[in-house]
Image (tube, helix red, strand yellow):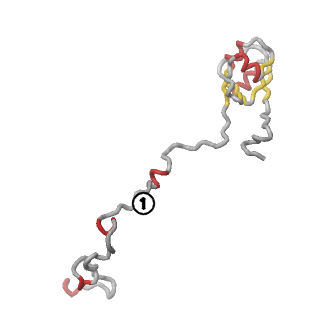
Amino acid sequence: MKLHDLKPAEGSHKRRKRKGRGEGSGKGKTAGRGTKGSRARGEVHLFFEGGQMPLQRRVPKLKGFTPPRRKHYGAVNLTELVTLDVSEIGPEELRSAGLVHKRDKLIKVLGTGEIDRAITVRAHAFSESAKSKIEAAGGKAEIVEVVYSDTHRKGKAE
């Protein structure tokens, strides 16, 4: 057996279709591209959507996720609480002292600073360090519950 005697198995090798080589070939004239249009004339890239805004540009890129009902807290540090000469501090006292903006519906106490006396603090949330520092000084950290009106119950009108 010589190299020129080697042949592929029957039916395994198919000749390619030579398009655009005359009418006699069966794939002449338009070469299987139909008539007119962008696909008949040139190459159209894979994700082209006919001029419509492509999917990769419609979808936002690496912008993260924002929960629709995210809670926004106004932050107050322990250093600011010490400046008030009151034994009980609540959301109303913090707003009147100017420590929290009026737009901040919820208030969170953070643990930056030290506290040297026993005070009762009422807020919507506390950081772990703030809660432990207030209780170590002999005070109380009370969580105020948020009351939703009937028309705005957790974002749904019922």
Residue at (78% x, 30% y) in the render: 143
Residue at (80% x, 20% y) in the render: 120
Can the viewer see residue 50?
A: yes
Comparing 26 with 81, the one in front is 26
Q: Position of residue 95 (x, y in %)?
A: 72, 20
Comparing 154 with 141, the one in front is 154
In this image, 71 relative to 122: left or right?
A: left
- The type of residue carrying mark 1 is Glu
Residue bearing the label numbered 1 = 49
Q: Position of residue 3 (x, y in %)?
A: 20, 83
Q: How many marks?
A: 1
Q: In the figure, residue 148 lies in which quadrant?
A: top right
Q: In the figure, residue 115 lies in which quadrant?
A: top right
Q: Give the crowd class for mark 1: few <14, some 14-19, many >=20 residues within 10 Å.
A: few
Is 115 rendered above or below residue 152? above
Label 1: which secondary element: loop
